Amino acid sequence: MTQLYLASGSPRRKELLAQTGVIFERIAAPIDETPLPDENPRDYVIRMAVEKAESGWQHLRDMGLALKPVLASDTSVVLGDEILGKPLDAADATAMLKKLSGTVHEVLTSLALRTEDGVETMLNVSRVTFATLSEAQIANYVASGEPMDKAGAYGIQGVGGLFVAHLEGSYTGVMGLPLYETAQLIARQGLGFMAD
């Protein structure tokens, strides 16, 4: 029996949430992901997760489904104050990877859990040191197709992990669902392996 809904189409988030032991189903939660003018990256990533969770909650209401907790997450790669989302095309992916090459950037992953009591949020912040990449390395990686659906145009769990010289923070947070924070959040609802 479903204990929780995951408002995400991401196969990585599905795989990570399964590790918590919670029984869940995925639901669609389409939202406008455009940053507001001058929006702080941390505010943006939290707002995205909240909007996804609220969209999922509304979907349950619209479909007449039982109102179980809805978990949503959002990940942004941030270089300085610039949010690097999912690339629009190969040229955009190339430009992002050139910016990240040889730098330290932050990966912000927010969580939002919508219940009948409201929305609870958490934010995971990781610092990633990227290797200096040659144009050929970037071109080969972009040609692989892996960067195209990933924030910042790389996936740490795939070939993109070869570019990560140092990680300070959460590996699963960089993947898109920080497991420690997720487990804490759902445990407060009596769900998952960490629940009392």
Image (spheres, rainbow, N blue to C red):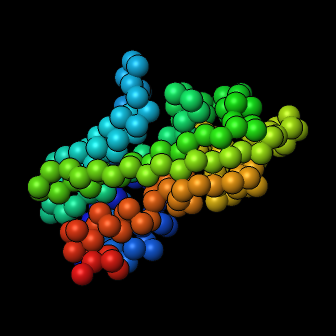
The quarter holding residue 52 reads: top left
x, y percent for residue 73: 39, 50
x, y percent for residue 140: 83, 43
Quadrant placement of the N terminus: bottom left
Give 67 or 45, whichever is nearer the viewer. 45
Outermost top residue: 37
Which residue lies at the image location 20% right of the left edge and 50% below the top edge? 119
The quarter holding residue 68 reads: bottom left
Give 124 or 146, whichever is nearer the viewer. 124
x, y percent for residue 195: 27, 78
**Relative to 136, is 68 on the left or the right?**
left
Vertical relation: 19 (above or below) 162: below
Give 23 or 167, whichever is nearer the viewer. 167
x, y percent for residue 16: 48, 66
Quadrant placement of the C terminus: bottom left
**Relative to 144, is 187 on the left or the right?**
left
Residue 106 seen in this snapshot: yes
